[in-house]
Image (spheres, rainbow, N blue to C red):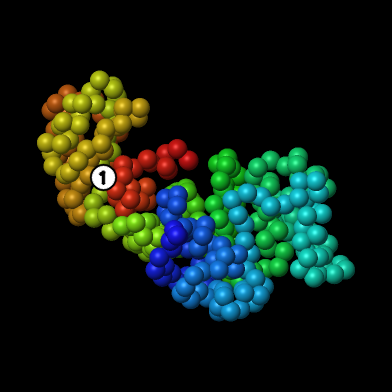
Amino acid sequence: MTTALDGIDLSVAPGTICGLLGPNGAGKTTLVRILATLLTADGGVARVAGHDVAGEAARVRGRIGLTGQYASVDELLSGRQNLEMFARLYRMRGPAVRRRADELLERFGLQGAARRPVRTYSGGMRRRLDLAVGLVVQPAVIFLDEPTTGLDPQSRSGLWDAVRELVRAGTTVLLTTQYLDEADHLADRIAVLANRDGAGGRVVVDGTPSELKSSLGSGYIDLTVRHTHQLALAAETLARTGGSATEVRDELRRVTLATGPAVATGTALLAAALRALEAAGVEVEDLALRRPTLDEVFASLMGRTPTHVEEAA
């Protein structure tokens, strides 16, 4: 038997966004399905909106919304028809059904496409409609399981705005995502799940984005050279100035040097690096001191090389 989760301990404050990160197989979706009463845990206790997910499943379902990785709306119906159908499933009747559909269509910018079949919608429009469906009854807690998967940057940004509006209205959000910049932009706190020593997924770190970045204990100097052929010389020169390992990225003409934990140390290292690069004849296009990214924090926790998701997003 495979243990999907092992010793999860997680608390989310009301009216906040908790980002749930972790590699594939760490148990993020399993945790969401348990909290949403779609799966039954073998042990432990979980409470959502004050109710036990095992003993009070019906009460939990009445307080939550769930949006999965793929839109769950009916493609043959229009956007309005989908919303009105779900409103009736929630036992709304009469004018309240149309009124709620109108409110949600306006809130998510879908008025112009309200009568069109969903099969004609773009990916971003479908995701917005899917989120709107989850809000037919304003939930106390909403689970967003990788809600922006496959969306273009503009659609992702629009969905982020919708999520922020939810929180301003008092909803608590648990967000699983593969996009580290998404967690950085949205989450008040971030929990990272990982499998360790053959056990099931567990929370290996939990804190605000700023706390997680500070936990890495170092900053970085990013150097971009004008000419690719000078990368090796630049890396060698930076390595002699101090700090720790350097990373070279040919496609960006960039060398990255990890500094010490103190800002003053990083600033002094930056000045020393600039002098050394000038003396070595390296033509510098850009030189900057920065804090770690969430990608670098995640890479450190997972024991891998950063993929710099923020640059690709």
Residue drawn at (65%, 42%) of the image = 123
Looking at this view, is 129 or 154 the one in front? Answer: 129
Task: Describe residue 193's horizontal placement relative to residue 122 as left or right.
Answer: left
Q: Circle 1: is it few (<14), some (14-19), or many (20+) Cα within 10 Å?
A: many
- Quadrant of the image occupied by residue 252: top left
Residue drawn at (55%, 55%) of the image = 145
Which residue is labeled 1 in the image?
A: 220
Looking at this view, is 27 or 232 the one in front? Answer: 27
Task: Describe residue 308's horizontal placement relative to residue 237 as left or right.
Answer: right
Q: Is residue 40 visible?
A: yes
- Extreme front residue here? 1
Q: Secondary structure at mark 1?
A: strand
Residue drawn at (57%, 42%) of the image = 150
Q: Is residue 169 visible?
A: no
123, above or below 29, in the image: above
Looking at this view, is 193 or 260 the one in front? Answer: 193
Task: Describe residue 144's horizontal placement relative to residue 74 as left or right.
Answer: left
- Extreme right residue here? 94
Mark count = 1
Quadrant that contains the N terminus: bottom left
Task: Describe residue 239's horizontal placement relative to residue 73 as left or right.
Answer: left
Looking at this view, is 276 or 230 the one in front? Answer: 230
At label 1, which amino acid type do we have? Answer: Tyr
- Quadrant of the image occupied by residue 58: bottom right
x then y, percent, for residue 127:
65, 49
Residue drawn at (58%, 79%) of the image = 55
x then y, percent, for residue 205:
35, 62
x then y, percent, for residue 18:
48, 63
